[in-house]
Image: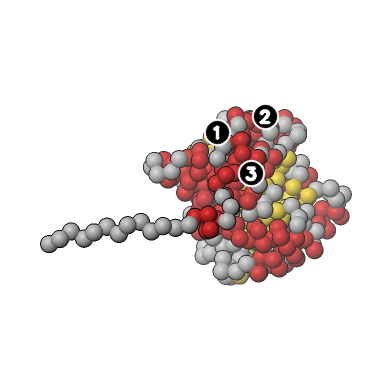
């Protein structure tokens, strides 16, 4: 059989196609790539979520979140000092509540000496200039793992909001700077604003988890705060359905009308479209939460040698800036801050 002949390459007039336009010119050299760069990640974009636990000198690894620990208050103070020295503007605090202290109504959330309050006081004493963001929701404190009060199978809205207002005031008394309700009850931002104002905390900011989706990506976080084991059912009657994004605009609009100073989208990477829509619609300070599952995915792939850890981390964070986020809650915060200090 005769071998088939290769076709000759066709003559193509590239100048006709390009019309003088060559996108690669600006990409030729590092100085030029820097000069045309549209978005930049800086340490000022970072909020570092940390987990606190009872005890002293305690650093308990979270199995599903490599290099993340449940920290006793003294250790949390040390990490706060480290964060401040790196220039990280703020920490977000999440408690692992002792099982014995969890109950049906999450009453521990109102104890002025609960873990979060003790952590706030200790950090404010030792590291006064770092911002403290506290989570308002009942799930770290309830025996059923839900963010609100449970009656039968129903999470009660208005009754829960009353408790959340008291929880927010309790945190503000302890030194929290930013109250961040993550519970997704209706009307909670307005009620918390009114409650804070009524007792003289009109300067305490509210960062609303406005578009918080019912997501599979929270799994490792629920390990970290110990609610995976006890959570009954799921959170789809209060957290958003991930098929929707118009609804995120309505949610954020309500939160802003009710007095939110900042809005947030959560999870992060799978929801960059929502970040962009909210930023374009409202032009207010907009944050994204790169949640535990996203962190775990990148760490796991890197541990297997399937991803370059540093490069994947930076790329994932810059994506938030490109989508319009003003800042990112990320468990990578200290690592990326160190890299930024060296110059990426
Ligand atoms: C609950 C809360 C959750 C997270 C922050 N606050 C989990 C949930 O809604 O079950 C998740 C954060 C993360 O996954 O990193 N109030």
Give the residue at the far left of this rendering.
1
Q: Quadrant of residue 252?
A: bottom right
Q: For this rendering, which residue is in front, 63 or 141?
A: 63
The image quadrant that residue 138 belongs to is bottom right
Q: Is residue 303 left or right of residue 232?
A: left
Residue 123: x percent and y percent? 70, 35
Mark in the foreground, 3 or 2: 3
Quarter of the figure with the N terminus: bottom left
Camera-nearest residue between 312 and 204: 312
| Spatial separation of the CA atoms under disc 1 and disc 3 | 43 Å
Location of the C terminus (image quadrant): top right
Any atom of ligand 1 within 8 Å of the CB at mark 3?
Answer: no
Number of numbered labels in the structure image: 3
Query: Which residue matches tag 3?
Result: 37
Q: Residue at x 51, y 65 (%)?
A: 233
Is disc 3 surrounded by few (<14), some (14 to 19) or many (20+) residues within 10 Å?
A: few
The residue that disc 2 covers is 85
Q: Position of residue 327 (x, y in %)?
A: 67, 47
Whether ligand 1 has any atom under 8 Å from the Cβ at mark 2 is answered as: no
Q: Which residue is mark 1?
A: 58
Residue drawn 67% across the image and 51% down it: 325
**Mark 1 or 2 closer to N-term?**
1
Q: Are marks 3 and 2 in contact (CB under 8 Å)?
A: no
Q: Is residue 237 above or below residue 260?
A: below
Tell me the SS state at disc 2: helix
Residue at 75% across, 57% down = 283
Q: CA distance from mark 1 to mark 2?
A: 22 Å
The earlier-in-sequence mark between 1 and 3 is: 3
Please indicate, yes or no, whether residue 314 appears anywhere in the rendered image: yes
Look at the numbered disc 3 and give the secondary structure of its residue.
loop
- Whether tag 1 and tag 3 are in contact, CB under 8 A, the answer is no
- Mark toward the viewer: 1 or 3: 3
């Amino acid at each position: 059989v005769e071998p088939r002949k290769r076709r000759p390459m066709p003559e193509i007039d590239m100048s006709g196609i390009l019309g003088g336009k060559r996108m690669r010119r600006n990409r030729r050299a590092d100085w030029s790539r820097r000069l045309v760069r549209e978005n930049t990640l800086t340490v000022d974009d970072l909020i570092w979520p940390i987990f606190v636990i009872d005890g002293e000198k305690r650093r308990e690894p979270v199995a599903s979140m490599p290099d993340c620990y449940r920290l006793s208050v003294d250790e949390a103070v040390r990490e706060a000092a480290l964060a401040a020295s790196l220039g990280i503007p703020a920490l977000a605090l999440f408690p692992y509540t002792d099982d014995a202290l969890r109950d049906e109504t999450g009453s521990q959330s109102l104890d002025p000496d609960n873990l979060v309050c003790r952590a706030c006081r200790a950090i404010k004493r030792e590291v006064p200039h770092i911002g403290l963001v506290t989570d308002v929701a009942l799930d770290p404190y309830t025996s059923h793992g839900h963010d609100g009060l449970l009656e039968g199978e129903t999470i009660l809205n208005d009754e829960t909001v009353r408790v959340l207002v008291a929880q927010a005031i309790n945190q503000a008394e302890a030194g929290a700077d930013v109250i961040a309700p993550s519970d997704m009850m209706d009307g909670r931002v307005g009620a918390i604003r009114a409650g804070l104002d009524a007792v003289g905390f009109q300067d305490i900011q509210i960062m609303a988890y406005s578009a918080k989706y019912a997501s599979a990506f929270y799994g490792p976080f629920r390990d970290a705060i110990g609610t995976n084991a006890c959570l009954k059912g799921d959170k789809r009657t209060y957290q958003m359905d991930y098929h929707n994004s118009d609804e995120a605009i309505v949610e954020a609009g309500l939160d802003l009308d009710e007095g939110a100073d900042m809005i947030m989208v959560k999870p992060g990477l799978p929801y960059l479209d929502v970040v962009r829509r909210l930023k374009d619609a409202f032009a207010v300070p907009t944050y994204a939460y790169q949640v535990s599952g996203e962190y775990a995915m990148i760490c796991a792939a890197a541990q297997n040698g399937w991803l370059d850890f540093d490069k994947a981390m930076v790329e994932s964070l810059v994506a938030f800036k490109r989508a319009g986020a003003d800042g990112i809650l990320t468990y990578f915060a200290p690592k990326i801050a160190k890299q930024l200090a060296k110059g990426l």
